[in-house]
Image (cartoon, rainbow, N blue to C red):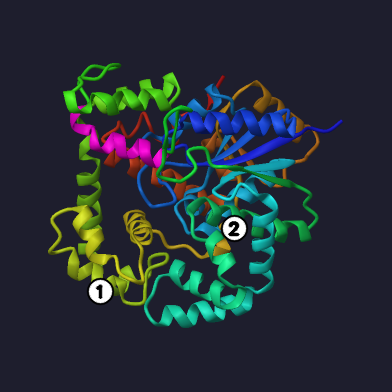
Amino acid sequence: DSMHAVGIIAEYNPFHNGHKYHIEKSKALTEADCVAVVMSGDFTQRGEPAVLDKWTRAESAVKNGADIVFELPFIFACNRAAMFARGSMDILIGVGATHISFGSESGDIDELKEVSDRLSENEDKLNDVRSQYMKEGISFAKANEFATEKILGSEYVRLIKTPNNILAIEYLKRLSYLNKLGCTVKPMTFKRQGSEYFDLNENAGFAGATVIRQMIHSNRAAFSNSADCFDLAADNEALLLDIAKFVPDDVYKSLCGFFSQKHAEKTEDRLFTLIRSEILKRTEEELSQIYCIGEGIENKFKKEILKAASLKEFISSAVSKRYTEATIRRMLTYILLGLKINESDINVYGRILAAGEAGRGMLRYIKNRDKSDIPIISNINKEAKAQLQISQTLRMDILAADMYNIITGRDLYKNSDRVKMPYIK
């Protein structure tokens, strides 16, 4: 007797109807008994604090079709695509997923596999050519496109340019590495609903998370004080009602509740204040010891932090041909956490944020058969001490949550990882 579990990798920032559709379709097509999600914690891959905290987002996922949600540790979640993919795949496969399902702009698994294989076969060549380009001072992503074009041709470049394809290819690369170690997981992909990343696909009630976040940011001012309804300024009326169209009711309520608290718009200011003080009190030398920082960017940070009047201004002063906005944001988040870690010390675990009945069934199944290849954690106070090899990675998750609570103005104790318990449906 075996258990079919389909794994999904997500940020759910925030959870919306397109995500719900993806969960339902993935479950139906794989005939899975269980949908296991691995989800970013409080900071996203672009280095930004998530719109809602990880517990709220995990609960929404379980209320809307997911069976269990594991946290993608901070060190993978807030990192470049290859690390994001490594953590996600290793956790899903570690907890016994039999299928993996992800969105992509391509929507064609064979096409993506072909690219992923060609990139893997030519990895050394690509790395060499990419470093050559990067010496000219251009970003990793651009250098990657140029190197791919030079070695594989322009047909391949088209596929590595869009955000979901980039991740999909990294998932498949990680999978082919794990296949060599005997892993038999089957990948599948969906064409992203609302086709392009920034599209609104209104008739279907789909809007990408990026669009919804833009709506939220442009409407912060119009969010009212009442807990579950909006004070609609005439010009914002359509937009605010739009959010309700694109997300499940419980997510809409969470968003209303969050924005009815007056401190929501101060998040960016608080973040800037903290980052500013971290950069001011460290020397260039000390900054350069932080994860992923070096090659002179620390000097730039020290110089610009004195002039910048806001986080936005500071980030744009540091963005260059070499460093994208997402890269800079991630670096600033590492500075915020004082992150110093060697990639060799980074280990995965399955930390449960929320679970429904089928999810608990999956946990019993893997426990009884000793099927899990990674530690499973539901209570960090008890289990973390026993697992020394994951203590550093876990410490960062706890600290990231604390920092998130400080910058979003939430109660530090009540919302801390040591107090919060998984949502059980």
Q: Name the residue nearer the viewer: 51 or 101.
A: 101
Q: Secondary structure at mark 2?
A: helix
Question: Which residue in the structure is indicated by mark 2?
Answer: 170
Instruction: State the image coordinates of residue 268 (x, y, percent, origin top left).
Output: 24, 45
**Residue plotted at (22% across, 54% down):** 312
Compared with 366, 250 (above or below) is: above
The verdict on residue 210 being magenta is yes
Between residue 18 and residue 378, name the one nearer to us. 18
* Image quadrant where residue 326 sits: bottom left
Give the crowd class for mark 1: few <14, some 14-19, many >=20 residues within 10 Å.
some
Q: Residue at x 32, y 54 (%)?
A: 336
Q: Identity of the amino acid at label 2?
A: Glu
Residues in magenta, as a range: 209-222
Quadrant location, the N terminus:
top right
Quadrant hosting residue 95: top right
Residue 245 x %, y %: 40, 23
Q: Which mark is residue 299?
A: 1
Q: Give the main secondary structure of the magenta stretch.
A: helix
Residue 305 placement: quadrant: bottom left
Residue visible at 63% across and 46% down?
Answer: 91
Counting residues from the N terminus, which is met first, the one under dot 2 or under dot 1? 2
* Residue type marked 1: Asn
- Identify whether 91 is placed above or below 343: above
